[in-house]
Image (tube, helix red, strand yellow):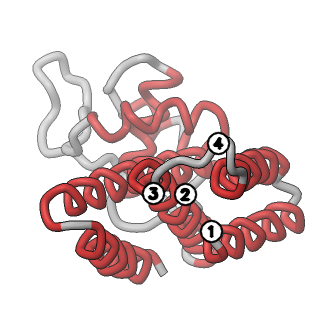
Amino acid sequence: MALVNALGVYVLLAAWSAGSWWVFAAMLVVVVTLDYIYFTKKHTLPAKYIAPGVVFLLTFTLYLVSGMRSLSLVGLGGDEPHYLVITHSLLADHDLQIENNHTQKDYRWFYGGELRPDYLVRGLNGAIYSIHAPGLPALLVPGYALWGVHGAVATMALLGALAAMAMFDTACRVAGRGVGWATWAVTDRKSTRLNS
């Protein structure tokens, strides 16, 4: 629990210094709630119920901090801006046609350079559709609608934390809690190293 509190305090301080009050408030609620559940005797839960929540909180915190750091230091690259153009098109135009989004340079809010449409051939209706699948952009829409590119990063951190929690829970059920923690530690460490 000390590690959870240490990471929680780190995120609280980082959010306070950055003036990110939503992140600060959310992390404060999460840390206080976990401490209350863990430390009060009348609400004590078995570790099998607390451990997945701790895995989720630790992973979400690590991914969020790593993702925001990467965004501020490196910016977007590779296919990331193309996925966000599709996300923007879904949110603003309610379609998957990206030509107008590139013509209007809707990507200028999250990408500094020139971004050409990533497509192979025009559709039967003459419109340009991205070669990238629309599933991930559809999942990013709520976060992007709330906080733009930072919301998209937070959504990816959330999805990654949910996946890590599911992997941890599966490993615990199949091979025991020790293997579950080892699996989480190895996969989470590799993922955060890729982000930095």
Q: CA distance from mark 4 to mark 2?
A: 19 Å
Mark positioned earlier in the residue sequence (4 or 2)? 4
124 shown above or below 172: above
The picture places residue 68, in percent across and down from the top left corner, at 61, 65
Q: Residue 47: which numbered mark, if any?
A: 3
Q: Closer to us: mark 4 or mark 2? A: 4
Secondary structure of the residue carrying tag 3 is helix
Residue in view at x 61 percent, y 68 percent: 65
The picture places residue 18, in percent across and down from the top left corner, at 84, 64
Which amino acid type is shown beneath numbered disc 3?
A: Ala
**On the image, which quarter does residue 9 sit in?**
bottom right
171 shown above or below 87: below
Q: CA distance from mark 1 to mark 2?
A: 8 Å
Residue extending farthest front: 42
Label 1 sits on residue: 4
Q: Residue 43: which numbered mark, if any?
A: 4
**For the residues bearing labels 3 and 1, Cβ distance under 8 angstroms:** no
**For the residues bearing labels 4 and 1, Cβ distance under 8 angstroms:** no
**For the residues bearing labels 1 and 2, Cβ distance under 8 angstroms:** yes
Which amino acid type is shown beneath numbered disc 2?
A: Leu
Mark positioned earlier in the residue sequence (3 or 1)? 1
Left or right for 118, reference 17: left
Mark positioned earlier in the residue sequence (4 or 1)? 1
